[in-house]
Image (tube, rainbow, N blue to C red):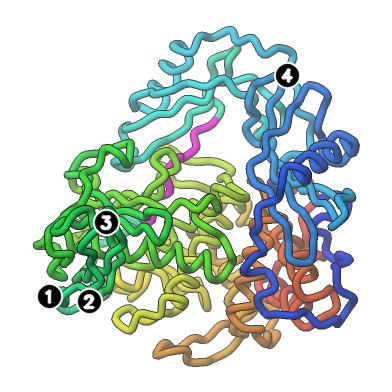
């Protein structure tokens, strides 16, 4: 089990929420607009002081400094400050924690990733950066980039190490970046962790190739962009309204930037300058190196991959729709909640059958397909929603896998939560966008053209036989591949939102089972999203496991709706229905 500790009232199973049991809450979206209001410097200062004063809870020692990553104020007044740590000036990997304060700045508790103290005998390495980089490159069979001295706290004790960025390698996905951690004293390779999140896992690719399967994407009808409107005659740059013909989503209206009388750029000034560029078949590392997409008509694409701009239409629509989803539903203003719109690079690399979120680039990377298994650009709407949600997760809880194998497959419960939450919010974005050419549902990857008609689904995850996704928790979750393991929390979310049993939503038939044979009544997708989002951004850390996710969502439900109400009880019942209960919570070390 991961070592995350929930202390002093934070994310406890029966929290004392701000509302009395059964007390009414003003809005079903009580965790939404305004909930992610950034806290001021006084709140951060109070949280730092509390972390030091309550060192027994937080684990913060005298030689450590706290670096603020995120600071949020809830509508009811609670404050949550997420910190990363440095030990004697050296960044700590795996030392993240969240300090919780009440409306008056009083200490409520902390949620921390590791339970042990962070300390090393010396911060002077025996290896040089060059030696560490060589060790990392040899281990990963790739090319080493930057090497940073860190204190690695992820393996049960703190170790002085180098964290080396590696590209390429024998088994690496094109465009993938990995962080290889090397002991700064012995030169031992301690871990390898992906830095880019790929939609198609190595395990899935291998399964499809072994079966001789190819994907035949269900694209939309060929379309011609309609005549655009909303151009300016004076004063540039100016916001304009263009039209696009997408591969997957039909004819679309796009907000663009007019730079001259007859010149337009695929950049949306109304959404933090969200922009799509062309990587030109290269594996670019910087968004700025992509070629800006411009034309003189403000009409984009022809609805097929024969026009390279069509993929850009889908990408731009996806990144702006995801921006809108997080802002309108949760009050989150961009991936990092900093007002900046996401970027996208289409035509990334040569024969790349995948799509990625790259935190180094701060953008989406879309391949055109490998020409074998995937023969279309991977720019479907829910692919973008899923991948950009990885960006949001990275900016908040930053779930990390327990281990990564030689092929790049990830394992463990925190990694499974990473995939699950990306599926949950990717599906939520599709519902919010509600495009009739791409009807919303609780399926992921239904446009990819797989024989099973979807990649994953939330109502009965085990119907995904390609990845072996599971419906319920068991002890195998400790070391299950993350896409397979994601079914546990995805299923809990679906049950919370929609309930168990047979139903038809839109035009899709669902039949969600329960582990204990119970009947679960859903509270609605809106409330379920608010609970899971608040849990992610306030009460989860990099090592959170499924049982800790249960207590985090219970705390979130208590915050928003009260600890004795229908919503709180439904959260408890939904987790029990996937076999995650207080009674079967594993002890430390399993």
**Which of the two labelled residues, at mark 4 and mark 2, occupies the earlier sequence position?**
4
**Which of the two labelled residues, at mark 2 and mark 1, occupies the earlier sequence position?**
1
SS for dot 4 = loop
Pick the front one: 240 or 369: 240
SS for dot 2 = strand
Separation of residues labelled 2 and 1 (CA atoms): 7 Å
The residue carrying pointer 1 sits among few (fewer than 14), some (14 to 19) or many (20 or more) residues within 10 Å by Cα, namely: some
**353 shown above or below 497:** above
Q: Are marks 4 and 3 in contact (CB under 8 Å)?
A: no
Mark 4 or mark 2: which is in front?
A: 2
**Which of the two labelled residues, at mark 4 and mark 3, occupies the earlier sequence position?**
4
Circle 3 residue: 235
**Which of the two labelled residues, at mark 3 and mark 1, occupies the earlier sequence position?**
1
Q: Confirm whether residue 201 shows in the render.
A: no
Q: Are marks 2 and 1 in contact (CB under 8 Å)?
A: yes
Separation of residues labelled 4 and 2 (CA atoms): 58 Å
State the residue at coordinates (77%, 54%). Answer: 79
Pick the front one: 323 or 574: 323
Mark 4 or mark 1: which is in front?
A: 1
Circle 4 residue: 120
SS for dot 1 = loop
Q: Which residues are magenta?
A: 191-200
Circle 2 residue: 251
Mark 3 or mark 1: which is in front?
A: 3
| Residue 51 in the figure: left or right of residue 459 | right
SS for dot 3 = loop
**Which of the two labelled residues, at mark 3 and mark 2, occupies the earlier sequence position?**
3
Circle 1 residue: 224
Magenta-drawn stretch contains 449: no
Please state the horizontal and vertical placement of residue 411, each as a whole percent of the image: 53, 48
In the picture as drawn, the residue positioned furthest to the left comes out as: 306
């Amino acid at each position: 089990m991961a070592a995350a500790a929930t202390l002093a009232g934070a994310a406890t199973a029966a929290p004392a929420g701000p509302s009395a049991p059964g007390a009414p809450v003003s809005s079903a979206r009580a965790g939404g607009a305004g909930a992610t209001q950034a806290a001021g410097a006084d709140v951060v200062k109070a949280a730092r002081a509390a972390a030091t004063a309550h060192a027994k809870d937080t684990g913060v020692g005298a030689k450590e400094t706290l670096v603020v990553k995120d600071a949020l104020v809830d509508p009811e007044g609670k404050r949550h400050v997420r910190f990363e740590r440095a030990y004697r000036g050296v960044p700590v990997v795996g030392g993240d924690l969240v300090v919780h304060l009440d409306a008056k700045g009083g200490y409520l508790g902390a949620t921390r990733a590791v339970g042990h103290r962070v300390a090393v005998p010396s911060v002077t390495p025996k290896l040089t950066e060059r030696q560490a980089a060589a060790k990392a490159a040899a281990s990963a069979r790739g090319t080493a980039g930057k090497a940073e001295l860190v204190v690695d706290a992820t393996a049960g004790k703190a170790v002085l190490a180098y964290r080396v960025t590696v590209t390429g390698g024998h088994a690496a996905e094109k465009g993938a970046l990995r962080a290889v951690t090397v002991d700064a004293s012995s030169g031992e390779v301690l871990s390898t962790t992906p830095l880019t999140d790929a939609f198609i896992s190595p395990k899935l690719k291998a399964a499809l190739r072994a079966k001789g399967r190819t994907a035949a994407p269900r694209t939309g009808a060929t379309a011609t962009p309609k005549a655009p409107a909303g151009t300016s005659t004076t004063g540039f740059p100016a916001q304009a309204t263009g039209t696009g013909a997408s591969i997957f989503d039909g004819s679309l209206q796009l907000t663009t930037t007019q730079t001259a009388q007859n010149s337009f750029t695929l950049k949306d000034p109304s959404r933090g300058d969200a922009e799509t560029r062309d990587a030109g078949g290269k594996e670019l590392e910087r968004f700025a190196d992509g070629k800006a997409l411009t034309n003189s008509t403000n009409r984009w694409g022809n609805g097929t991959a024969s026009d390279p701009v069509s993929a850009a239409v889908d990408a731009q629509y996806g990144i702006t729709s995801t921006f809108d989803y997080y802002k309108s539903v949760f009050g989150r203003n961009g991936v990092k909640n900093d007002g900046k719109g996401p970027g996208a690079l289409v035509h990334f690399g040569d024969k790349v059958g995948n799509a990625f979120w790259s935190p180094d680039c701060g953008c989406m990377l879309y391949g055109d397909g490998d020409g074998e298994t995937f023969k279309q650009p991977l720019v479907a709407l829910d692919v973008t929603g899923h991948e950009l949600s990885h960006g949001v997760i990275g900016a908040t809880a930053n779930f990390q896998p327990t281990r990564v194998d030689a092929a790049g497959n990830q394992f463990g419960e925190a990694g499974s939560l990473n995939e699950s939450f990306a599926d949950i919010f990717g599906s939520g974005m599709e519902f919010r966008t509600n495009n009739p050419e791409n009807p919303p549902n609780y399926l992921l990857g239904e446009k990819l053209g797989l024989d099973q008609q979807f990649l994953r689904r939330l109502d009965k995850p085990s119907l995904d036989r390609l990845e072996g996704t599971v419906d319920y928790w068991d002890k195998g979750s400790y070391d299950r591949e993350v896409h397979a393991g994601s079914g546990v929390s995805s299923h809990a979310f679906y049950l919370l939102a929609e309930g168990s049993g047979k139903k038809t939503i839109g035009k899709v038939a669902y039949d969600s089972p329960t582990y204990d044979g119970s009947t679960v009544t859903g509270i609605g997708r809106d409330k379920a999203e608010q609970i899971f989002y608040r849990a992610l951004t306030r009460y989860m850390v990099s090592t959170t496991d499924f049982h800790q996710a249960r207590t985090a969502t219970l705390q979130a439900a208590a915050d928003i709706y009260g600890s004795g109400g229908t919503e709180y009880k439904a959260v408890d019942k939904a987790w029990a229905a996937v076999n995650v209960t207080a009674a079967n919570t594993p002890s430390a070390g399993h």
